Image (spheres, rainbow, N blue to C red):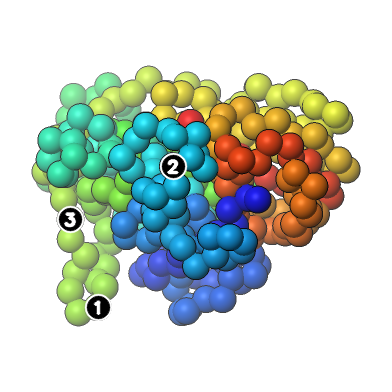
Amino acid sequence: MPLFLKPVLKDKVWGGTKFEAFDYELPSQTVGEAWTISAHHRGACEIVEGEYRGYTLDYLWSHHRELFGDFPSEEFPLLTKLIDAKEPLSIHVHPNDAYAFEHEEGKYGKSECWYVIEAEPGAEIIYGFKDERCPNNIDKLRNQDYENLFNKIKVQAGDFYYIPAGMIHSVGAGVLLYETMQASDISYRIYDYGREYGNSRRELNREKAIEVLELPEIENNSSTDVEYRENHKRTQLVSNDFFTMVKWDISGTLNYMKPREFVLVSVIKGEGQVVTDGEIYHIQKGSNFILTSHDLDTVFEGNFELIVSFL
């Protein structure tokens, strides 16, 4: 059977209450992140149904690797999140694998991608520098001269962005998005609007951020890889060395064949059911699960939208 997971909710100074629409019980009015599928030590999800109920995903990865096709990695390689930015996130950057391995105790670096679920009018993101080739960008960062330094893009529901490690970025106020990333929680903050958490100002890591900055070639992020299978819309949003992310718009019945030994699935709209090996499970907006190597025959039925992520 699929591994159904309970999300780990994270309180953030910039968070809000939009996860109530996903039927999550919020511990506060400032929940900024829901780690929907995670085996990370800072927030491992718990299995909520079936034979492995009560176990965490990191435990299964360590003790039942056969569920994942005996995939050869010490740590579960992916992490998915929902982000509710009531206020803007810090402007920050993530290291690549080589830097993280050397400076962060052998951890993964962090490349990630965003699918925008909702955006209030005028909402925007920061996506790199306004002029990537300007020789003064680093000096401006060190001098905290941020005016007109960053590339600000207005976003709307359905937009997609890939953020490679080394790229400066942030999510603006009024954005709700789904995120697939390498299983890492390493961020180097450059600017955080002078905010405090508890009784102290949140830490900045400006010099580390400058060390890991890269100027990647930015391609058009509007996906054109759209196809229809059994009359259902399949949009491949990104596919690279770290992950593939696919959005499915399902109406009716889809006979689904896993592209890898295991895949991560989140329902972002609607409801229906997933049938694996003859067993039926109800799914709805807010459901998150893994189709394991043991789930050989899978059928989706209903009217809903899925994000599917895999290696």
On the image, the x and y values in percent for residue 141 come to 18, 42
Q: Which residue is disc 2 drawn over?
A: 65
Characterize the local packing of mark 2: few (<14), some (14-19) or many (20 or more) Cα atoms within 10 angstroms.
some
Of labels 1 and 2, earlier in sequence is: 2
On the image, the x and y values in percent for residue 132 come to 30, 26
Which label sits on residue 204?
A: 3
Mark toward the viewer: 1 or 2: 2
Q: Amino acid at mark 2?
A: Arg
Q: Quadrant of residue 96?
A: top left
Of residues 45 and 145, the one drawn nearer to the viewer in this rendering: 45
Q: Residue at x 64, y 70 (%)?
A: 23
Q: Is residue 244 visible?
A: yes
Q: CA distance from mark 2 to mark 3?
A: 38 Å
Q: Secondary structure at mark 3?
A: loop
Q: Which residue is disc 1 drawn over?
A: 198
On the image, the x and y values in percent for residue 35 come to 46, 57
In the image, taking residue 285 as reference, residue 135 lies left or right, namely: left
Q: Secondary structure at mark 2?
A: helix
